[in-house]
Amino acid sequence: MNFDCGWAGKILWVDLSSGSHFTEETSPYLPDYLGGRGLAAKIAWDHLPTGIDGFDEKNLLMFMTGPLGGTLAPSAGRGYVFGMAPQAYPPHYTRSGFGGRWSSKLKYAGYDGLIIKGKADSPSILFVNDEKVELMDGKRYFGLDAIETQKALQEEFGQDVGLIVIGPAGENLVRFATIQSGANSAAGQGGFGAVMGSKNLKAIVIRGSGGIKIANMEGLLNLRKECARMMGVEPARPPEVESITTYTGLEWKSKDLIEQGEMDRVTMAFVSCTGCLSLCRAGGVTTQRYFKNVPGVSHPARVSGAAKCVEWGIMGWGSVAMGELENIKEKTGRGYRYNPGFRSGFEIANLTDRYGLNAWEFCSIQVWLTECKMAGVDMDAVMGMPFEENGPLFWQTLLRKIAYREGFGEVLAEGMARAGDQLGEEFKRHSLHAAYGYAHHGLGKYNWAFLPFPYWIPVALMWSLDTRDPMSDTGHKYCFDLALNPNEEKAAKVAEKFYEAKNTLAPRPSQIPDGEIPEKLLDLAYSDKEMVAFKHQNRAMANGCLILCDGAFPFVFSPITPDGNGDTAMEAKLLEAVTGLEIDEAGLDKMGEALFNLERNISIRDGKTEEDDLSFIPAMETRGDWTRGIKMDGKRYGELIKKYYLKRGWDPETGRPAPAKVLQKVRGSSKN
């Protein structure tokens, strides 16, 4: 078939060292590698050197879109960046996704991907103006924060451009520096902002005047309407809210904050990426708020913006997990870990975007350092400054020290995993580092401590078999749509159908007694969980090729259907409407499986072994989760990973894909 619908048709390569560029056709990679994550994996397999650090000039920085990008397909307004990641420990190939307008603009300029290699001689910006590609002097932008940089670029190039920028943290090669696009869209995990900094690349400006050809526009519009119906989305004016409640258990009264002059207004923040319908609610994020005119604490500006997800943990940390709350009360005599106040907290969250720092890593550092203090570590002496976790300027000062690698910030700028090694065993004992250079996410304690046993077991599997924290683009639907669904009976039936297994949600936390857990329930807890990881990783890979957001897809559960079943074939339908590629749900999952095998082999080439798959078991065995204190059963978990290997057809002893599964062509995936 022709691939002139959906895909832009070209991949742009730019060599910063020589200032040259060329394009290659996308079609030779199609349909097997689809786009996005699959296309990047193929290029990495063929062209990315092994054994290099993220800061090596030979590292490739790959910005990828998908065939649905730039269209009206819901949640397709995102993109990915790939390469050897400085945050990863040890450095290895991985990914980071982010929203904004850049991916659509890249498609409109005629490119499915942008691959950057080499290093510019001096601070530069890259201007992609349709077919005209120019490396320009960027000295005047270096030193500006990420928001200031974007404002300055818009003044020079216009408001209609797509922007990819770094802040001071990227310039100073902080290992968890972000790439920013827009007010708070960030490629957070991985430290790819530092890769841009190492290449002397401050920003990429994209102007595209073209469009994307759609195979079946009427069909796409009808599917978009069906997506809105399945999501239960009803257009509404964002309402004023009476209180601001964080997922960590802190609460501020809106009326009090407004009367005290700490802001002018607060509403629900129904914001989304280009073309999306979910309004960042489909993934369970219902605490999103938009604040207007919040006065700065460390700077005079009045800031407006949204807070969602990890920003709440940055702004202040109470606790919704009983084990953690009891520990905090015992050690501090209060019911929260830190609370600098709303105004200061909002500024801290805003500064992570301005400096270009991974908010998840910084929030994890906040919890880590307060945990060390509660354990009796003399943090004043270690940091060389008073440790005032509730002070109005403490966290702002620490952020600046990290972004500019000053004092104790020089240690933390290496990321939590490396900093723990440098600081010693006492600090490592309390570290939130889970695996591969990334902090806990969905593993039953620290951030996402609210996810109870046994639901964090399949999440742990996703961690074991990935190259990074998987909970930003892989596991949301299991957790929010099913595991935490209050309608347990309906969720169980939906789960059994989707995963083709009976015990993916068993046993329910309410069935687990206090004290010693009976062997039968433990067996049940580790039963069928490999099916959850297998299904979501395959689908996440496929959706990472298209590119669709894990907060919206797959439609596992729907609030408007009588039985709760969503339309899990919707991604395949959207792909066909946009590109004309006839493929069913099973075929899409098979493509995802084949490409996941390719990524696995890249990891093995980078040095990953089956021992790495099991690397975080000791930490999960020694300290229980924060809801019930339940620890991982290492023996049962090891057996579960073997089941997972067998499900994938990998060697059960080494976890290596069979040769035939590495780069297998996808056959039998089209509709009959």
Image (cartoon, rainbow, N blue to C red):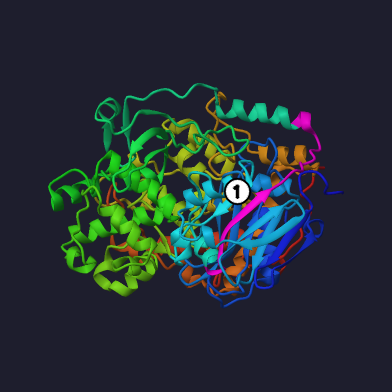
Left or right placement of residue 460 versus residue 598 in this view: left
Question: From this viewpoint, is residue 32 visible?
Answer: no
Residue at (42, 35) in percent of width and height = 288
Of 578 and 350, nearer the camera is 350
Residue at (22, 52) in percent of width and height = 389
- Asked whether residue 237 is drawn in magenta, I would say no
For disc 1, the marked residue is 156
* Amino acid beneath label 1: Glu
Question: From this viewpoint, is residue 655 visible?
Answer: yes
- Specify the segment rendered in magenta: 198-219
Left or right placement of residue 473 versus residue 302 in this view: right
Image x and y of residue 371, in percent: 24, 57
Tag count in the figure?
Answer: 1
Image x and y of residue 571, in percent: 67, 40
Left or right placement of residue 212 versus residue 289 in this view: right
Left or right placement of residue 25 versus residue 63 in this view: right
Image x and y of residue 266, in percent: 37, 29
Image x and y of residue 480, in percent: 46, 39
